[in-house]
Amino acid sequence: MAKEKKKGYDFLEVEAKIRNMWQKEKTFKFDPSKKKVYSIDTPPPTISGNMHIGHAFSYSQQDFIARFRRMFQGVFYPFGTDDNGLPTERLVERLKKVKSTGMSRAAFIDLCLKTISEERGTFIDGWKQLGISADYDICYSTIDENSRRISQKYFIDLYKKGEIYKDEFPTLWCPECQTAIAQAELEDKEFPSKFSTLKFGLVGNEKTLPIATTRPELLPACVAIFVHPEDERFKSFVGKKAVVPLFGQEVSIIADKSADPEKGTGILMICSYGDKFDVDAIQRHTLVPRIVFDKDGTATYKGYEGLKIKEARKKVLENLEKAGLVTETKDITHAVNVHDKCGCEIEFLPTPQWFIKIIDKKKKFIDQGNKIKWYPEYMHKRYDNWVNGLEWDWNISRSRHFGIPLPVWECKECGEIILPEEKELPIDPLQTEKKCPKCNKPAKPEEMVLDTWATSSLSPKLASSLVGDKIDLPYSLRPQAHDIIRTWAFYTIVRAHLHENKMPWEEIMISGNVSLKGEKMSKSKGNVIDPKEVLEKYGADPLRFWAAGSTLGNDLDYMEEDLITGKKTVNKLWNASKFVFMNLEDFNGKAPKKLEKIDEIFLTKVGITLEKITRHFEKYEYSKARAEFDQFFWKDFCDNYLEIVKKRVYHGEGDKRKSSQYALYNGLLVLLKTIAPIMPFVTEEIYQTYYLKKEKIKSIHLCDWPKPEFMEQKRLDQVYLGQEFTGVLEQIRKEKTKAQKSMNSEVKISLEKSIIEELAALLDDLKDVTNAKEIVEGDFGVEFL
RNA sequence: GGCCCGGUAGGCUAAUGGUAGACCGCCUCGUUUACACCGAGAUGGCGGAGGUUCGAUUCCUCCUCGGGCCACCA
């Protein structure tokens, strides 16, 4: 065999080569003819320039499973990108230096689509470099024509089933993005604020009522005052009218149990709309709302026109103070709901919106969640908590340029809702005229687009549509991170239930996030790690090795040391394999007549390790699989077994040599296969270099997962014997170290009679590995020669 | 305020109702027919209080600290 004078392992060169090979050979192409298919509902990342380290982390973890499963059965592992919605708009605005608001919808959409197609290739390259073994030919974008068609089709399906309705209702509104949003898009943020106690007047009474608020700018929107029916202080005012300070409107004082006498001054003002409590209160008492802010968050009331909410707040407060209507002001910090995409404080605004009915099915969604196996289990709780805490139906309409249009027209005359035919999809109502079938008048196209989750929640359908809908629900696995349980996981469960009355997947695997020194990574903190740089410096295998280091569901701190460890492992694998095959030139692949005892023990232990790793992977415990491999590979295989058989493969003859060759060849192959899901590049390179000729299967990743075929009933005895052997070996090594001698210094060993008898079949190996000239009976001792 | 996760060697982390196991680092020593991206060895640890138990790092309760989710946002 040609001995290449390779100085070590050149990961850049190897990884590029292997990557090309996989691509050329279509190694990971989905084969629909396979009977048992393991289907993965791959998360579609949002195109955002480059892959970030969090992607590298979680996609590696999915890929461990995909590669593991592929060694048992067919794997459906599609790829997709989620590029519809605000993040994409932002990206395009940034890259192209445009403002979506300054363009027509059609022009902006064109620009978005163009930008996406420009960015898409490089973006997906990141995943390929990482060695993600998806079938990239099965690839969707949530904005492409096919996805638009499917998304609209299922919208129509739900509408026809009566699960979608349109309503004008005060909804969560982002004044910055100028769109309605869903409950799932809320985030908490701490803000400093002023908590002021104001004097409300009373009609026909000299007294004033103290009311505390952080939002004086909503005074003109005040429509009622609540006091608790049993609050002795204010009971007598119920039924009377109060006068709003500064703005003068008279509002009713209403008894309502929701007014907590302990909170603030015990009196509560109801405004349209300060929070969702106001929304509820106004509905319950059928009050007439007074809307005082516009969609862009500017005031519309006299004296304050055009002021932003916060400016108005400041000015109203100043004027109140000037008028002596403020009795107390405290500086406080409180958490308010903000939009997760822009961090802007959300408001409530009554606008017509489209909703999917979910509130009436909370119990059903809990049931559905119970049918899915959650890994790790406790993540299930997060789902339940979210579902139990839901307060609104799912608002799926967004007032944005870029997105999948709601496929709807509305008759101006009779309000009839007009839907397109399925064959017309995808359709943009703004580009197509429709007439009302009832009154034959032109209908008004819906201008809003769908919430991006309304499309990504159909990801199983989007992917399956690319292979002729051959993959049915439920999929085998949904891998995703925990931060989108309340959105992606929940909404997908909702859609699968509403459309098909099925679970979307049998199992869900939730991974954690990447942090740096315990802090969440974010661009604003400047503590981001670029996976490209990591890949260049260490390679994909070490990066994946690192990603395999956290137990499932746990966040993982990025530490460069772990990459170094991974790189060492890659190198060690390469060198150990090189050593093995240096001594296998004359190996014919056949088992010897009789295996040497120590070789048998070694293979037994390989089998035990294999069983453990298999169980770990089956339960998505890739970190335990890695740890198990590490332990065995470094200690048992390299430091012990290779040292033990060294002399035998160098100088041994006949079956003795064959036995070690057989054990080395097969043991190493099993080990390589068990770590191949985590470190696909080195293992493939070793396989291609040394094993391909005999093994025939064209890639290690297409081989069958090994079976522990070397294990016999005697395995416990063997393990015991192996332990005895290593115990003695350790003692001898310790003596050598103590004496500051080298490990291969020549010695004479004395061992107790019982041990000699026990290890009878292994004494030659003990001599080899310790370089002992002689082993004699006696008290334990090591004599240096 | 509710719920969830976690507190284990200097750092990061694993297992476990009965002498707590790796990895990185530190210290000592060794090494060239796979590998200095090496080997042999040494050092060093269960947040606090109570309870269950023959025995608790492990199970329970409380406290405390860190992280997350939700609620509160008069």
Image: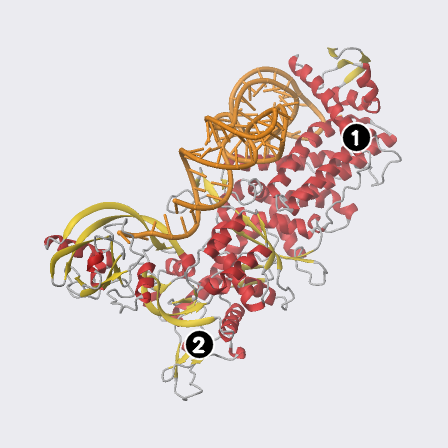
Q: Residue drawn 82% across and 29% down?
A: A597
Give the image location of residue B2, x and y in percent. Answer: 43, 46
Q: Which chain does the numbered disc 2 sit on?
A: A
Q: Nearer the viewer, residue A606 or A688?
A: A606
Give the image location of residue A576, x and y in percent. Answer: 69, 34
Residue A103, visible in the rendered structure: no
Disc 2 residue type (three-letter): Val
Residue A566 lies in what quarter of the image? Answer: top right
Q: Which residue is mark 2?
A: A408
Cα–Cα span, label 2 and label 1:
73 Å
Q: Which residue is mark 1?
A: A718
Give the image location of residue A44, x and y in percent. Answer: 52, 58
Disc 1 residue type (three-letter): Gln
Q: Nearer the viewer, residue B11 or A745?
A: B11
Q: Secondary structure at mark 2?
A: loop
Q: Residue drawn 51% across and 79% down?
A: A424
Q: Residue drawn 72% across and 22% down?
A: A727
Residue A566 numbered mark, or none: none
Q: Secondary structure at mark 1?
A: helix
Q: Which chain does the numbered disc 1 sit on?
A: A
